[in-house]
Image (spheres, grey):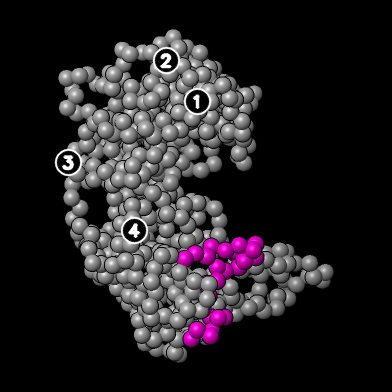
Amino acid sequence: MPSEFDHEADHGFDHEADYGFDHEFVRAAARAADRLAAPLAADCDEEPAGVTHRALARRAKTLVAAYRCPDSALHGSGRAVTAATNHLRALRNVQTATGLFAGGDNVQSPPDSAFTVNDVCDAHVLAAGAGPQLCDVTAALGQIADAATASLLTGGVHTPNHRWELCAALARLHRSFPDDRLLDRIEEWLAEGVDIDAEGLYSERSANYAAHVSNPSLLLLADVLDRADLQDAVERNLATTLDLIAPDGTVETVHSRRQDQNHPFPLAPYLPHYRLLAIRTGRGDFARAARLAGEGGIDDPGLLAETLLAPDLCRTLPEPEARTLPRDRYLTTARLATHTTATAHTVVYGGSDVPEHRRIRSGLACNPTFLRLFAGDAVLDAVRLSRGFFDLGPFRAADMQRIDAGRYRLTQTLTAAYYQPLPPHRRQDDGAYRMADEGRFSAAMAFPDRPRDEVTHTTRVDVDLTQDGADLRIDLSGPRVPWALELTFRPGDVTQGAVPIGDGRWCLTTGAMTYRVGDDEIRVEARVDSGEPLAGPESSDVLRYDPGQDYTVAGGTDATTGNRLYIGGQGPQTLTVTLRAHRTTPTT
């Protein structure tokens, strides 16, 4: 057992600097690693079966980190070494002749393989020079890395964040096996510029990919290449993310262009980045976010390896900076506004890509939620608006204006057409006209060549953010069509004042509705300012969410789940909806 290692020595500290070492943080990281590694070490003679290449590499890295760390139950354990060796053998067996790894729906994928090579190279740094027991592990890691180098050096990508994951793998390869070709290739990718906008959002606007790919990759590149500008980019992203943290400890995703746009994303994966930059920069707001990210405990088995590879992580955090309230942020590039007070946290969103691209597509921001409201444990997860206009789907603002402090206007105009006969010079005797897409559907009718009679429908939503919620003024103009405002609350509540219509749904016509969880509540009132009376609970054809034909033609939906309150009617119509939060114990 390598008893010559202790906490500080193995993390790059000396004993005289002990005052700055956060022992409890390292112990928590070791416990998280042991929860994954200890069962693997206990069954170390068992060959891993049915495990993906990324999981094999992650497990091997965690086993090596546990072996190296004095706070791990596997410190110096031969069984950990045996388990790591078996996992690396299995990993080598799924490495193809190209050096890339088999598995997953991306065939012969350099970026997918880069994720694995990043873990392989980190494990190599941890194993190299750590004693004779890890010699075979070090050699196996070197062979896997060497076999993958040529393909990663020349390989391509297909998403924005892949560039930085691939660059990180090339940088790690260079760190262990110096080669100027690797640096040249990294520079070729970095010369495109990091895809971070003026507001500090990456182009994919995804919390998931920022936390798991872009931020860690750019921090690694900053360290290996001595590029302070890359760390600065991460700092900008983390600073913006501070205003996207909801009271329930999740990061806002409604504006994302990736898979997380319909799911909450926890703050926990941001912990190492907030912690590292809080320590390096002394930022108390980052220290506060790091503390918040770790409040539920550390459950990331990979964090232990990070503490060994980046010893700065193990230093004591600077004093957290108290959050000042109220707090407002409007991200112009994503058209996303947040307003946080001691009583409520409100999100207004008008940045969907669908109005411009006129399609639902992977890589576009498609979520039709335009407002959320948090009041402690009472959470209004989504406010959406359906219109029965040519099955073109729910309201997604094409434009968002900041009218004044705390006041926003969201607007969308939809257009559909009826087509006239073709002009004489466009007619064909055989009637075989070219297939064309007119925005709603495709047909062999040469739509662009025909005169059009257009029908339009405009939806405008004015949002006035208050200290305890929001006032919505909704104006629907155009032909008479049904509409329904859907408010989705998280389950576990007591609902009063609305009429139940089955399947976790309620209808509100007159009066007020209250959604209560414990001592926290959200109150909803609606008033018609012009137009017909609101639809009653018998109007099931109106009081529903319609995802639009882009989903229904494929038998799909993007509908929410939870307790859904409907306010509906027949347009044209103007109404006011008031949302008020009440908390017995306000946020501090």
Front: mark 4 or 1: 1
The reply, left or right, for residue 129 in relation to residue 403 is right
Crowding at dot 4, Cα within 10 Å, few <14 / some 14-19 / many 20+, comes out as some
Q: Which residue is mark 2?
A: 128
> Mark 3 and mark 2 in contact (Cβ < 8 Å)?
no
> Looking at the image, how many numbered discs can be counted on the residues?
4
Q: Which residue is mark 4?
A: 332
Would you identify the image quadrant in which residue 195 lies? Answer: top left
User: Magenta part of the protein: which range?
Assistant: 536-562
Crowding at dot 2, Cα within 10 Å, few <14 / some 14-19 / many 20+, comes out as some
Would you identify the image quadrant in which residue 548 lies? Answer: bottom right
Disc 1 to disc 2, C-alpha distance: 24 Å
- Kindly state the secondary structure of the residue where label 2 is placed: loop
The amino acid at mark 4 is: Thr
> Mark 3 and mark 4 in contact (Cβ < 8 Å)?
no
Disc 2 to disc 4, C-alpha distance: 48 Å
- Kindly state the secondary structure of the residue where label 4 is placed: loop
Q: Which residue is mark 1?
A: 42
Vertical side of 549 occupied by 235: above or below = above
Q: Earlier in the sequence, mark 4 or mark 3?
A: 3
Disc 2 to disc 3, C-alpha distance: 36 Å
Disc 4 to disc 3, C-alpha distance: 31 Å
Front: mark 1 or 2: 1
Disc 3 to disc 1, C-alpha distance: 41 Å
Residue at image coords 65%, 62%: 554
Residue at image coords 71%, 70%: 445
The amino acid at mark 3 is: Glu
Q: Which residue is mark 3?
A: 319
